[in-house]
Image: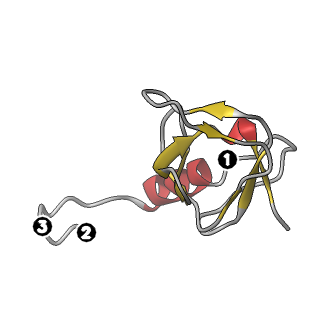
Amino acid sequence: MCPECAHEWSANDIDADTEENTLVTDANGTRLETGDTITVIKDLKVKGSSSVVKVGTRVKNIRLVEGDHDIDCKIDGIGAMKLKSQFVKKVI
């Protein structure tokens, strides 16, 4: 139950949300989770800037979000960005 609006969820709703969040995979099919470290596998142009995220750029402590760009992160030298999981691989 939500303490602010008193909305109640059923157990099925919670399980469905958990399954949706685990479906984010990298370019190799490895499952990504919040807090993982990833590497960029393709040069990515930064929209609205002349900057480029180079191949091999390591990004620490990612956060998974819903939407087309499903990774929210902060890249050193560039700042906060959203990335598509198809252009990254997980660092093991």
Q: Indicate which label's residue lies in the foreground, 3 or 1.
A: 1
Secondary structure of the residue carrying numbered label 1: loop
Q: CA distance from mark 2 to mark 3?
A: 9 Å
| Vertical side of 48 occupied by 37: above or below | below
Q: Which one is earlier in the sequence, the residue at label 3 or at label 1?
A: 3
User: In percent of the image, x 38 and y 59: which residue is there?
Assistant: 10
Name the residue type under label 2. Met
User: Cβ–Cβ below 8 Å for labels 2 and 3?
Assistant: no
Secondary structure of the residue carrying numbered label 2: loop
Please rate how many residues cluster around mark 2, counting C-alpha atoms within 10 Å: few if below 14, some from 14 to 19, many from 20: few
- Numbered circle sitting on residue 1: 2
Q: Which residue is mark 1?
A: 23
Q: CA distance from mark 1 to mark 2?
A: 26 Å
Q: Which residue is mark 3?
A: 4
| Vertical side of 63 occupied by 26: above or below | above
**How far from the left and from the top, in percent, is residue 59?**
65, 60
